[in-house]
Amino acid sequence: MAPPADHDITEFLHSWREGDEAALEKLTPLVYRELHRLAAHYMRREKVEHTLQATALVNEAYVRLIDWKNVQWQNRGHFFGVAAQVMRRILVDYARSRCYDKRGGGARPMTLDEAPPVTDDKLAVLLEIDQALDRLAALDARRAQVVELRYFAGLSVEETAEALKVSPITVIRNWNFAKAWLLRELSK
Amino acid sequence: MSPERFEQIETLYNDALALEPNARNAFLDRACGTDGDLRQEIESLLTSERSNTCLDTDAIQFAAESLAQQDGAEFMGRMLGRYQLLSLVGRGGMGEVYCGVDTRLNRLVAIKVLPAYMTDSREWSERLEQEARAVAALNHPHICTLYDLGNDGGMHYLVFEYLIGELLSDRLAKTGLPLPEALRYAIQIADALVTTHQEGIIHCDLKPRNIMLTKAGVKLLDFGIAELRYASDARVNDAVRDSASGTLAYMAPEQIERREKDTRTDIFGFGLVLYQMVTGRPAFLGNDQASLIQSILNDTPAPASHYAPKTPPALDFLLARCLAKDPSERWQSICDVLLMLKWVAA
């Protein structure tokens, strides 16, 4: 597949922000393909290989999805914010579809109706994080945004600081706190 | 909690975090004074893990790792025609279902790879093609659209609209449906059946597992494909297959007795789904295959109002007529069912 050009992705993000839900459908396959590319790597990965490479791959995936550095928006901060929301939506939808084993076009004919749905611990955690993040946002929107940018969009501390127009120190303090807060929620 | 309080907690938490663990108590003594709530709040935050937590791995990496561990991961990335398989989402007698990408149109699709026994004879692959063409022509907001039928190196596959939602069977296993919601879904299902019956297509496998609840309402899955399966896999032991598929509980008497099926078979199936949506339980139950078959052939289910007292009498009547053993005693057309349902729901 010829990947859509960067300006298309930017265009989709714009449309989605304007309320065009169909734009999300254009972005979803791109995220899924990056997911698959990463997953394929994890399957091949040998235990000795260290995490640095994994991190590089994840960064590469983000760059391929949305080339943060080269985005020409009048307001880069706003762009980061929209992209992070989109990533969150797509990944959470993915987790939800996997956790319930939902999909289009198919029954699960071999399993008994009474059989429990297939669940995946990791993805269930992703859904819990999403829900806990909603609760955090109700208390404090800024800290929730920090999590969205760092966790769902993979932004560094510096990029997050730029997006939110605050200092990196503030981001670190917000992030430390939000993380502790969310982890406490998850353990409840 | 006020923003100032939130701010205060964050500041003290970070300050405490920067200290050696054994210095934290003294710090909190000073900083919190007599404010016990504040101190408790910060202490409980300090007990959270701080390294290698689920939040220290980006969400996409987290999702990719789980994708790598899942069943069928070896097929990931494989191309079938112009479709790339991304993950296995279901496996069964009717084949395997994958989430994939249509690389030409850049959209997500659900791909069902059909088992060889359904496609290995020329007669069957022709019939499949014919049937698929009819189903693909169905255009209805409450039917999962069949986009394509393909054959890649002898592997036959069907390509469907990709849906995000929850299967009715999963929903019913978790919670019941409020009556208005059940009626709304039932109207959508009946509406979809009106269209397909007009096109001469019978579903023949209506059951909660073939119904997806999405944001856009109900979507019926596997339209017309069931019919093919019944006709095609005579070589597979029917009883074993049907009970294993969970289909047996949703069969009409004429299906069990292998008599002629027609649109009224779907009306029975519709009745079963509606009954379960309203009451939260299947109309027919059995401890084993034999008792289930006996029950479908002989038992009259208790009126829905017996389990769900809010059920209006008209709905009890509607259900009883859907679930008549003899097709000639059922509603003869899904159009009538739809009209009646709309009247009940109004």
Image (tube, rainbow, N blue to C red):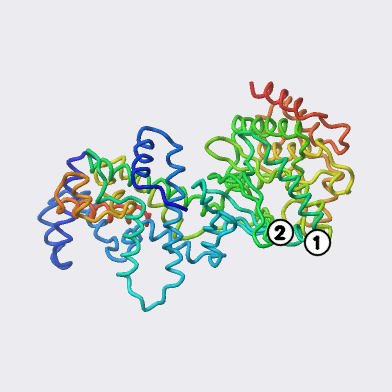
Give x and y (percent) for residue B16.
Answer: 16, 59
Q: Is residue B231 left or right of residue B27?
A: right
| Residue A145, label in figure | none
Secondary structure state at the residue bearing disc 1:
loop
Q: Are circles 1 and 2 on residues that touch, CB within 8 Å?
A: yes
Q: Chain of mark 1?
A: B
Q: Quadrant of residue B161?
A: top right
Which is nearer the eye, B151 or B114? Answer: B151
Instruction: Tell me if I can see residue B21 in this picture.
Output: yes
**Is A86 located above or below residue B288 in the figure?**
above
Residue at numbered disc 2? B93
Q: Is residue A55 left or right of residue B116?
A: left
Which is nearer the eye, B54 or B69? Answer: B69
Q: Chain of mark 2?
A: B
Asked if marks 1 and 2 fall on the same chain, the answer is yes
Q: Residue at x 68, y 23 (%)?
A: B344
Give x and y (percent) for residue B25.
Answer: 15, 62
Query: Which residue is farthest left?
Result: B30
Give x and y (percent) for residue A139.
Answer: 28, 41
| Residue B236, label in figure | 1
Q: Is residue A12 left or right of residue B51?
A: right
**Is B164 located above or below residue B178 in the figure?**
below
Q: Residue at x 75, y 30 (%)?
A: B316
Secondary structure state at the residue bearing disc 2:
loop
